[in-house]
Amino acid sequence: MVVENIDHSEEAAKQITVVVFASDQGPGDAERTAIMSQVGNILAKQKARIICLAQKDLLPLPLLTSAHLADADIELVCDKEIDLPASLKDIDKTIIENPAERHKALAQAADCFIGLPGSLASATSFFLTIADLGASKPMVFLNKNRAYEILRGISVDVFAHSFHKAHRNIQFVESVGEIWPKVEKLTG
């Protein structure tokens, strides 16, 4: 008799891959640093696979650090070789020099996108990555301090009329604690 060893536990369930767009550059750094640290910790505890963009020598270091300390599965998609702090040297890196190909790779890897309040550079990268998807993949925006209020208006006025799934796939939350429940709901 052959007995199959099948793991029916929740941990054997599909790992959710999130692509997180965040930056700690510019005004509001201290608050964004705290937000990124909290999000990195939450995503790691949920066993999410975390992919972040590193380009023009900018990367979400607080998110990476807290997620790495919590033993998360992390990958960086980089525009060039990047020198990471010693504590993060074992993070997987994929180097894609062409910006369009870099954004395409992020779009293909994501089960869900997460946009954290950040710089114009991170918002631009987020937009370029999702621009060709037609709002077909889930997106969760942390609208802390009304960071994505303009996008919220656009999503109601433009996306909802242009893309039939936009009303379900584009979600806004007001606190860090609301991010993961939205990700689970959208990817489940």
Image: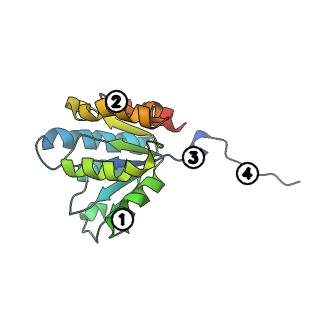
Residue under label 3, please give it: 14
The label nearer to you, 1 versus 2, is 2
Amino acid on which the number 4 mark rests in the picture: Asn
Amino acid on which the number 1 mark rests in the picture: Asp
* Left/right of residue 84 with respect to residue 96 in the rendered view: left
The label nearer to you, 2 versus 3, is 2
The label nearer to you, 2 versus 4, is 2
Amino acid on which the number 2 mark rests in the picture: Asp
Residue under label 1, please give it: 90
Whether the residues at callouts 2 and 3 have beta carbons within 8 Å, the answer is no
Residue under label 2, please give it: 157
Q: Nearer the viewer, residue 92 or 144?
A: 144
- Determine the CA span between mark 1 and mark 2: 44 Å
The mark nearer the N terminus, 2 or 4, is 4
* Residue 172 visible at all: no
Residue drawn where x is 37% and y is 39% of the image = 42
The mark nearer the N terminus, 1 or 2, is 1
User: Crowding at label 2, few (<14), some or many (≥20) Cα neighbours within 10 Å?
Assistant: few
**Secondary structure beneath label 2:** helix
Whether the residues at callouts 2 and 4 have beta carbons within 8 Å, the answer is no
Q: Nearer the viewer, residue 174 or 150?
A: 150
- Determine the CA span between mark 2 and mark 3: 34 Å
